[in-house]
Amino acid sequence: MAACRVSAVLANERASCFVPGDQGGTYNGNPLMIAAARSVFAIVSEPAFLDRVVAAERTCKSACWRRAWSTGSVCAGRGLLWALVLPDARASQVVEACFSRGLLLNTPRPNLLRLMPSLRVSDAEIDEMVAILERALRN
């Protein structure tokens, strides 16, 4: 199955350089992708979904700050996009150790770990993420 991407550009009349119908492309207007995007938008627009994301943000923030405090690292982020700045340049080793335990992280810099859990992440999954990260950072 081919990968599918949906994107949108939203701009008011003052900011847009296009007139309606001016922007076009090979993948524009695909009915299946539009239907899928509408379904996703309907789900993420529900108040209960946002409430869960906010709760997950609090859990991630707490876990990240606990980790930062215990190692002298710096934690920064918002929503479900968090970064842990390590006091040394071993992020790639930590990412490899996490990956071998089933956790996918990103390391955009030698001393930076980027945590990007799904918007549908559960508290149990956050706890598992933290446990795996703890083990990887100890090694």
Image (cartoon, rainbow, N blue to C red):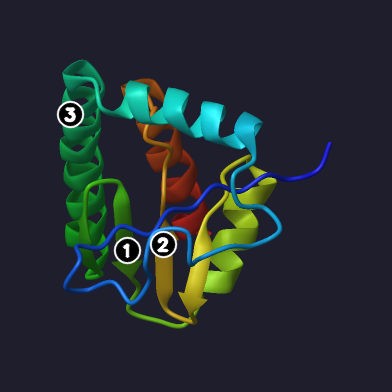
User: Which residue in the structure is indicated by mark 3?
Assistant: 55
Q: Quadrant of residue 57?
A: top left
Q: Is residue 105 left or right of residue 134?
A: right
What's the mark number on residue 83? 1
Q: Tell which tag, 1 or 3, sits nearer the viewer.
A: 3
Q: Quadrant of residue 120?
A: top left
C-beta proximity under 8 Å, tags 3 and 2: no
Place of residue 66 in the rendered image (x, y in percent of width and height, measured from the top left): 19, 49
Crowding at label 1, few (<14), some or many (≥20) Cα neighbours within 10 Å?
A: many
Type of amino acid at the residue the image marks with label 3? Ala
Cα distance in 3D space between marks 3 and 2: 19 Å
What's the mark number on residue 114? 2
Q: Dot 2 lies on which element?
A: strand
Q: In the image, what residue occupies the spot 52% across and 63% down?
A: 106
Q: Nearer the viewer, residue 131 or 76?
A: 76
Cα distance in 3D space between marks 1 and 2: 4 Å
Type of amino acid at the residue the image marks with label 1? Ala
Q: Nearer the viewer, residue 113 or 48?
A: 48
